[in-house]
Amino acid sequence: MNIVFKSKLRNFRDVMRLQGVDNMKTLETLSVLILIRWMRQNKGEMGQLSWSKLVELPINEMVQLLKKEVNFLRNQLHKKLHNFNQMYENVNVLREYVQFVNDMTFEHDEIGHLYRDMVEELLSDKETPFNNHHLGKVMVNFARPHSKDVILDPIAGPGWLLVEAYKFILERERELKDPLLIGMEINNVLSFVAEVSLRLQGVTNPIIITKDLLEKYNSEDISADVILSILPSGKRVDSFVEPTLHKKLDTDREELLNLQLVIELLKPQGRCAIVVPDGVLSGNSPAHKKIRQQLVKENNLQAIISLPFGYIHSYSQHASLLLLAKDIEIKRVWYYDMNGKNDRRFEMRENDALREEFKLMQQAFQIQVLKQGELGADSEIEVATKQKNWFVEVSKVESPDYYLYPNFYRQNEDEQFRGKDSTLLLDEITSLEGEITTKIKILESLLEDWRK
């Protein structure tokens, strides 16, 4: 984050808190004013008066004009913007917001970054998974969207994954038409933030809908070629769930229902990169087993990538990135483990070591999965990723219960024990314990002799 801007933002946030305005209200108010300024400067959609003239108006005239423009945004974007109404009640506070936005740099290449930094700072006390920058790029690189795709994030948050998808397409297609970017987000403020995020990047018509798809959806009305999402974790759904969804998966686990939803909405030959809590891979309930069967048999699970512990802030457990390639025959599932033993390099998120690990993982995926080649025994990638990646035959995954947890199939020093009868294993362990006990007694005897 720009250090000067970060300092100004934190000071402004603290001033607003002292005046009784919480971070979400500040985020919505700043987002509204940023979008108004952006549209005035770039689109000419908000009347003839320039932003520079607007900020010089007497406060009462400014408030009246802002009311008209906020109503315009409500009608155009179908957003409720509840919190902004309260800003009219204290014109002095509103003037401070306008001045803060007026002081921001609005160059096209910079405003998107500043806005993202602002959102993350104001959401920093929330349990949100939206500040994993490099993960978003990795997910998009795997899904490889293009402008003709329908691209969906059913739990969009501030829209970062959709922004990364747009950037990916923009870098690769010269004559770019607006791709169909669709985001669903139940929170009114985050829904509006996602809209602003995409518009500041140059997307003219993003579709961001304030809606919980678990409550009402129809796969005939909405389906996608590419789905990118970080699923919620650890909650039980206590609200109404679409009956057709419940019939397909009888559970109240939020992450399982959302995963079922993703499966329903992914088009034939669609691609999906989605982050799930590891409980999805190892849970023993009938719903867990059924969703895993669908992933393997119907949606062609290509890869499971174990992310560093704690990387997804909102998860209290490990997380994995799943890659799906619907209707492409998959005979083996590729595993990659980013949790090295005693590896503390990734405790600082988004650091150089983590970026390098993501890069190596993607190179290994390209060679082994997409090109179906082998890593050379002495190659840099082989040396760097040794014992971090392996294949498991789909036939092996199918039994028992489509169990997908990485450690169950890990090829490491414990491989010598895998597949052995439990009685034989116990005998071997008992024998080893006996040898250790004997050696301890010998050592104690030697120490006793030495003391004498």
Image: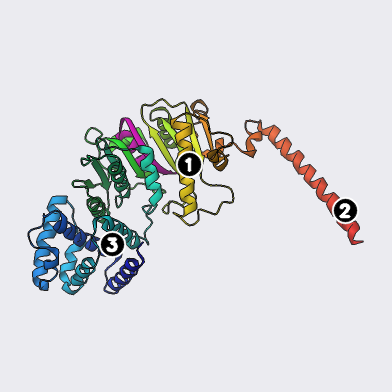
Q: Residue 86 sits in which quadrant?
A: bottom left
Residue tagged 1:
361
Q: In this view, does 328 lie to the left or right of 149?
A: right
Question: Residue 197 at x, y = what percent?
Answer: 26, 53
Residue tagged 3:
24
Q: Which of marks 2 and 1 is nearer the N terminus?
A: 1
Asked if one can make out residue 278 in the rendered structure from this viewpoint, the answer is no
| Residues drawn in magenta | 257-279
Q: How far apart are marks 1 and 3 (CA)?
A: 37 Å
Q: Is residue 85 left or right of residue 337?
A: left
Instruction: Pick whichever, 118 or 245, lies toward us.
Output: 118
Q: Is mark 3 on a helix, strand or loop?
A: helix
Q: What element carries label 2?
A: helix
Labels 1 and 3 touching (C-beta < 8 A): no
Residue visible at 36% across and 26% down in the picture: 327
Q: Which amino acid does label 1 sit on?
A: Met
Q: Is mark 1 on a helix, strand or loop?
A: helix
Question: Residue 443 at x, y = what percent?
Answer: 84, 52
Based on the picture, tell me whether residue 258 belongs to the magenta stretch: yes
Q: Which amino acid does label 3 sit on?
A: Met
- Quarter of the picture holding the C terminus: bottom right
Question: Residue 397 at x, y = what percent?
Answer: 50, 30
Residue tagged 2:
445
Instruction: Pick whichever, 449 or 328, lies toward us.
Output: 328
Q: How crowded is mark 2: few (under 14 residues within 10 Å), some or many (20 or more)?
A: few
Instruction: Pick whichever, 323 or 147, lies toward us.
Output: 147
Q: How crowded is mark 3: few (under 14 residues within 10 Å), some or many (20 or more)?
A: some
Residue at far right of view = 452
Q: Which of marks 1 and 3 is nearer the N terminus?
A: 3
Instruction: Pick whichever, 259 or 73, lies toward us.
Output: 73
Q: Which amino acid does label 2 sit on?
A: Ser
Labels 2 and 1 touching (C-beta < 8 A): no
